[in-house]
């Protein structure tokens, strides 16, 4: 039995679970927002017992042979800046505390990704440090809330971008995209910057961008023609549904570095973002250990969902 920790609706979960069920692999989805779902842990009489009820069926944690951690923010309260009532905040924190204890109960089965490895590689500074250690080119980066450490970047580069260290929701549904900033703007915001660390990087003149999805030992690379439209030149997420995707070959050198990154980060799934500069230099931006892929699959016909289903099924067969 594969346990998917996520929620409805999630087209990624629905697509992969349909593939798994079609090939005869049992799957259950634990949805913390489904009022009929529940989880129970019992520690008594010198024994530990755990049960999950999902979609009308109750089963023991002993039946779990693999876990797919597919938890994504599903309510405003789960996003930084999203707010929420006191009751919603309490519910979210209690569910979060319980779900993150699951590895203690299911340490003997494969996780995609292992939860401890899912968390640590999510930090952008940690990703950049690991990428540079492996040999990736990374952008000139300063992360600070001290204006005196940020301002010298404008002596080294003509243009600088600002990006958040974590996703942030501006209610009801807006996010902060990557933006070009000026030295005057930074200096004028001295007091605001002092309140929290900010991430600044050199602005790279792009030829195009890459989204590379790694699923186990399979690699799916997509070129993003972000520079052909003004809305996507700086941050392609501003018009993500635009037709600008094509499958591409990234070559053995980049492939080798990706495999090394996955090994060192102890990941089995990762979605990487790169910039390819005008002089064809490939620059690492980040790796999302739970990144989306379905819109790329629809645009390019790359079988990423099937690869995820195969990875889950293979993990189940090894336990």
Image (cartoon, rainbow, N blue to C red):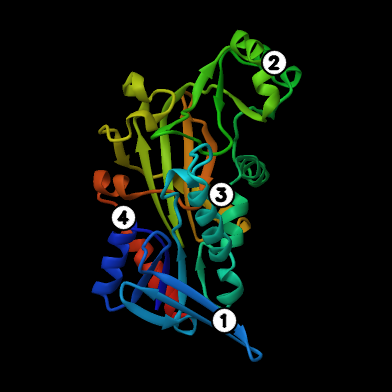
Give the vertical position of 125 relative to 109 (above or below): above
Determine the residue located farthest toward the top in the rendered image: 184
Q: N-terminal of the two: label 2 or label 3?
A: 2
Rendered location of residue 169, percent (x, y) = 47, 36
Determine the CA span between mark 1 and mark 2. 56 Å
Rendered location of residue 201, percent (x, y) = 60, 26
Front in this rendered view, residue 134 or 18 = 18
State the SS at label 2: loop
Residues at circles 2 and 3 in contact by the CB criterion of under 8 Å: no
Check disc 2 and report the residue beneath it.
151
State the SS at label 3: helix
Check disc 4 and report the residue beneath it.
9
Determine the CA span between mark 2 and mark 3. 33 Å
Classed neighbour count for the residue bearing mark 2: other residues with Cα under 10 Å, few (<14), some (14–19), many (≥20): some
Image depth: mark 4 or mark 2 in front: 4
> Which quarter of the figure has residue 138?
top right
Give the vertical position of 117 relative to 106 (above or below): above
Check disc 3 and report the residue beneath it.
257
Q: In this view, does 2 lie to the left or right of 44?
A: left
Q: N-terminal of the two: label 1 or label 4?
A: 4
């Amino acid at each position: 039995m594969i346990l998917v920790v996520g929620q409805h609706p999630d087209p990624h979960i629905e697509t992969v679970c349909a593939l798994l069920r079609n090939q005869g692999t049992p799957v259950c989805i634990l949805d913390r927002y489904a009022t009929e779902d529940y989880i129970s842990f019992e520690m008594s009489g010198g024994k530990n017992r755990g049960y999950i009820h999902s979609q009308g069926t109750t089963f023991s944690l002993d039946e779990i042979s693999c876990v797919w951690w597919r938890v994504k923010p599903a309510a405003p309260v789960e996003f930084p800046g999203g707010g929420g009532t006191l009751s919603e905040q309490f519910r979210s924190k209690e569910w979060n505390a319980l779900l993150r204890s699951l590895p203690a109960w299911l340490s003997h089965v494969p996780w995609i990704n292992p939860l401890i490895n899912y968390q640590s590689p999510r930090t952008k500074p940690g990703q950049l440090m690991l990428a540079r250690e492996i040999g990736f080119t990374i952008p000139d980066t300063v992360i600070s809330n001290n204006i005196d450490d940020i301002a010298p970047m404008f002596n080294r580069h003509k243009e600088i971008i600002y990006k958040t260290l974590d996703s942030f929701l501006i209610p009801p549904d807006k996010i902060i995209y990557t933006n070009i900033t000026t030295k005057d703007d930074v200096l004028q915001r001295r007091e605001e910057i002092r309140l929290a660390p900010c991430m600044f990087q050199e602005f790279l003149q792009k030829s195009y961008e890459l989204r590379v999805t790694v699923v186990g030992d399979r690699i799916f690379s997509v070129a993003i023609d972000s520079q052909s439209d003004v809305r996507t030149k700086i941050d392609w997420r501003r018009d993500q549904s635009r037709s600008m995707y094509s499958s591409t070959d990234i070559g053995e050198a980049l492939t080798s570095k990706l495999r090394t990154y996955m090994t060192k980060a102890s990941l089995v799934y990762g979605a990487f973002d790169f910039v390819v500069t005008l002089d064809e230099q490939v620059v690492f931006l980040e790796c999302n250990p739970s990144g989306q892929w379905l819109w790329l699959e629809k645009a390019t016909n790359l079988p990423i969902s099937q690869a995820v289903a195969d990875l889950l099924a293979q993990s189940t067969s090894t336990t």
